[in-house]
Image (spheres, rainbow, N blue to C red):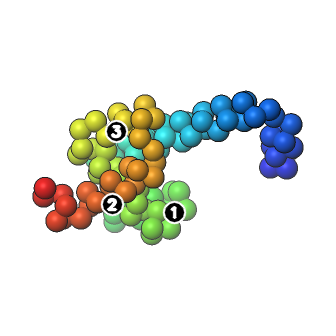
Amino acid sequence: MFAELVERLIDTDDDTLTARLRAVELQQRRLQAEQSALISEVDRRGLHLTDGHRNLGGYLRANLNWSDFQVRTAKKLATLLDTVAGCGDALLAGRIGVAQTAELARLRANPRVRER
């Protein structure tokens, strides 16, 4: 399956390859924004409790097979998009990248930075 994908890409012209790479990046940004919104809503509804978990982290680890690091990063990002006006829209529209939002989320989670 992956080998077939690679084989198709080998035969792809340069302009098409660049266009596809950009399209995939935009799709990843949109999906990350959607996933963050989903995580926020799961948390708001307390679905982790009805699923038998004490906290959102346990729910995400169980349902998505995530590591502790992935859980922490996702929770910080969801909080960022919920609390910083325009950030979610920028990620959803593709104006800002996943790595940039992850860094902003990391900074936003720091109490000394958050207060400013």
Cβ atoms at labels 2 and 3 below 8 Å apart = no
The crowd level at tag 1 (other Cα within 10 Å; few <14, some 14-19, many 20+) is some
Between marks 1 and 2 in the image, the one whose residue lies nearer the viewer? 2
Q: Which residue is mark 3?
A: 88
Question: Badge 2: how crowded within 10 Å, few (<14), some, or many (20+)?
Answer: some
- Residue 67, given in percent of the width and then of the height, sits at 50, 67
Q: Quadrant of residue 7?
A: top right
Mark 2: which secondary structure?
helix
What amino acid type is highlighted by mark number 1?
Trp
The answer to which of marks 3 and 1 sits earlier in the sequence is: 1
- Seen at 34% across and 39% down, the residue is 88
Q: Amino acid at mark 2?
A: Arg
Which amino acid type is marked by label 3?
A: Gly
The tag earlier along the polypeptide, 1 or 2, is 1
> Quadrant where the C terminus lies?
bottom left
Q: Position of residue 57 (x, y in %)?
A: 39, 63
Q: Is residue 40 in sight in this rendering?
A: yes
Q: Residue 25 at what x, y percent from top left?
A: 56, 40
Give the labeled residue for mark 1: 66
Residue 47 visible from this viewpoint: no
Residue 116 - label: none
Q: Quadrant of residue 74?
A: bottom left
Residue topped by disc 2: 106
* Residue with the most extreme bottom position: 68
Residue sticking out furthest to the front: 14
Report, in whole angstroms, how far the alpha carbon at label 3 lies from the one at label 1: 22 Å
Give the CA separation, mark 2 to mark 3. Answer: 15 Å
Mark closer to the observer (3, 1): 3
Callout 3: SS: helix
